[in-house]
Image: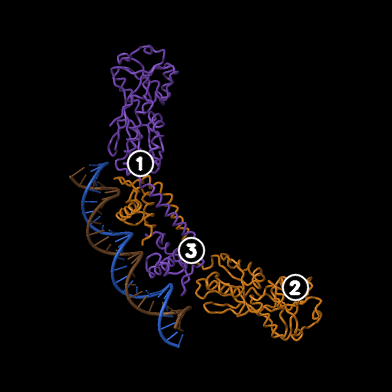
Chain colours: A purple, B orange, C brown, D blue
Amino acid sequence: MQPKLNLSLRQLEYFKTISDAGSFRGAAERLGVTQPTLTAQIATLEESLGVKLFERTRSGATPTVAARELMPVCHRIQEEVQSFVDTAHGFSGGVAGTYRIGVTPTLGPYLLPQVLPEIHKRFQELRLFVREGVPAELSQDLRSAKHDLILSTQPIAESGLEVSPLFREPLKLVLPLDHRLASKDVINRTDLMGEEVLTLDEHHLYHRQVTELCQTLGANTRRDFEGTSLDTLRQMVVMGMGITFLPALYVASEIRETDPLRVADVFGVNMYRDHALAWRSRSPARPLFRRLAQTIRELVPNTAASELRVLY
Amino acid sequence: MQPKLNLSLRQLEYFKTISDAGSFRGAAERLGVTQPTLTAQIATLEESLGVKLFERTRSGATPTVAARELMPVCHRIQEEVQSFVDTAHGFSGGVAGTYRIGVTPTLGPYLLPQVLPEIHKRFQELRLFVREGVPAELSQDLRSAKHDLILSTQPIAESGLEVSPLFREPLKLVLPLDHRLASKDVINRTDLMGEEVLTLDEHHLYHRQVTELCQTLGANTRRDFEGTSLDTLRQMVVMGMGITFLPALYVASEIRETDPLRVADVFGVNMYRDHALAWRSRSPARPLFRRLAQTIRELVPNTAASELRVLY
DNA sequence: ATAGGTGATAGATTTTTACTATCAAATTAT
DNA sequence: ATAATTTGATAGTAAAAATCTATCACCTAT
C-alpha cells in the first residue's frame, strides 16, 4: 500500500533550481549532479503530478503556467522542512522543551516557588508544565508516560524508574494556643499518648505516614474529621478540633507568627519524610533530569525551611 | 555537493504514524511495511536530526518531548505537500492558470471587452493577465517567454511560433465635418490624392500600414504631427489637423454619431489589417490556445463592428 | 517452563537515484 | 553552404537507499 505523497523533497529542490537557472544544464552545475538526472527526475515529477512543469527549448527551459503557480507552495514546503530541522536542532543540547512534571500537593506548591527562579536561570530553554496528583497516581502516570518526571515522596517503587533522592523534610507538631501542651517548653513523645491527631483523607500517602507515626506514639488519628489539604488541617487545628503534623516547608511557607498556633518539635522520635525526583529509566532526557535533581539538591539549603537535609 | 534537506517525506509519514499508533509494530501494519523498516528509517531520521524521537519500551513507543514539539511542523509539511499535489491536479485539464497575454494598443482594448465575458463563460478556470505593447515588442516578448500568447496584427514572423489567424478588420476613413470630402456621397480612392493623413508615431506597426496605404493612394502622411494613440488621432481630426484612417473596431467602440466626424469607406482600394493569436510552438498549453482562437473566431461576428471577416 | 508481544539486528533483495556515453535537434559562427 | 556549439532526451550501467526475511533480546503473563 503506497502513500499518496508521490514526490520527493529532492525533486522539489530540482524543480526550484531549474526554474531559477533557466536551464537543465545550468541547474545541474549548481546542484552538482548531471543533467540526465534532472531530465529523469523532472519527467517523473511531471508524470506523477499530471502536468508539464517546463517548456523545453534549445535555449533552455521555461516554467509553465502550472509551474509558476506551484512555486510559492514549493517554497513553503522547503521553509517548513527547514523549520522542522531547525526545531530539532534546538533540542540537541537536550534541554529545550516543555516537560510535564507531576508533583504532590503536600510538597510541590511549597518547594517549587522557591527553586524555580534559579532553575530557570540555569536552564533557560527548559519549560515545566506542573500538574498535581497523589503519589500513587503520580507513579502510575509516570509509567504510562503521562508525566515526563515526578517530584514525589518516598517510598517510590523503583521498577522501570530511576529515582533520585533529593532531601529529607521534618514534620512539625502544630497545636492550638489553648492546648494543654502549648505552653510546655519541651514536648516529649510521651506527651502525645492518647492525643487526637488530624490528618488528610485516606488516598493521600500523607494519611498513611501520619497514621504510622501515631501508632508509634500511641496517639489516635481522628477518623470522623479528615482534611482535604494541608490548609484545611491548619484551619481545623485553629478551631480546636485536634492537633496535627505539618511538613516543615508548609510551615515555613504558610504559617505566620501571628497565627494562634504553636509549632514544635517532638523529642525522642524522628518525624520526617524523604522526597525524590523520578523518571522512566529509558527516558532520553535522563541526563537533563539528573542535572535538574542535582540543582534542586544545591538549592534546598537556601529555602525558608532551614532544617531540610540534603540526601545523596 | 549534497543538499541540506536530509530527510524524506516518507520518513515523516513513518514518524507521524508511529506516534499515532503508539508502537512500531502497530504502525507497520497500518502502513503496510515491515517493522524493521520503521526501526531503520526512524533511526536514520534521529541520527540526521540529532535527537531521539521515541522512547522505546516493551509496551511500545512513546514520543519524546522533541517529537511532540516537532509534530505540528510535520503536519504542516504534509499539508503543504498535499496542497502542492492538489494545485497541480487543478491544472490537469490544461485550462487553469493565469496566462499572460500581450495585446496591441490599437486592437486589444476594443476587442477584448466584447469577447471576454463569453470566453470566461466557456473557460471558467482561465485567467488572463493583459499587457499592451506594439507588435514588434509583443513578438519578442513572446519568444523570450515574457508573454504566454499574444493578440496581434499580421504580419507575425512565424519562426518558433504557432500563428492562428483570427479575422480581417477594415480601416475607415475619418474626416472632420467641414472637410471638402465630408459631404460627398461616395468617396473614391482618387479623391484622396494629396491629402494630409495623420498617423501614429513610427514605432507603431500602424504607422507603417498607414504609410504604405498613403503611398498607394498618393496621399501624404503628416510627419510634423503624430498621434500617440487612436484617441489622439481622433481629436486631431476633430481639430482640423488632417484626416486619418481608424480601425473598424475602434470606430464602432469609440466614435459616437454626435461626434463632428464623417466616417466613410473608400472605393477602389482595399483597406484592412488581419489579426491573429500567436504562441510558442512548443508551449504545453497549445491545445488550450487553439481552442481559445477558435472561440474568438466564433464570437467576432457578434461584435459591434459588423464588417469584420473571420479568417480560416 | 512456554507463549506472546515489543523493538533491534544482520544479511539478502528490491527499488530508486544517479552516472556515463551518446544521440537528436536547433541555433550560431565561419 | 558547412562546422561548431549548446540544449534536453535516451539507453544502459553503477551506486545508494529502502525494504524484506529471519532471528534475537527482553519482558510479562500463564
B195 sits to left or right of B208 = right
Callouts 1 and 3 close, C-beta under 8 Å: no
- The residue wearing badge 2 is B236
The residue where tag 3 is placed is: B89
Residue B240 visible, this orientation: yes
Alpha-carbon span between mark 3 and mark 2? 53 Å
Q: Amino acid at mark 1?
A: Ala
Question: Which residue in the protein does label 1 denote?
Answer: A145
Q: Alpha-carbon neighbours of circle 2 within 10 Å: few (<14), some, or many (≥20)?
A: some
Disc nearer the start of the sequence (3/2): 3
Q: Residues within 10 Å of mark 1 (few under 14, many from 20)?
A: some
User: Label 3 sits on what residue type?
Assistant: His
In the image, residue C4 lies at what x, y percent? 27, 48
Residue type at numbered disc 2: Met
Q: Is residue A170 above or below residue B215?
A: above
Using the image as rendered, state which of residue A100 and residue B117 is in the foreground: A100
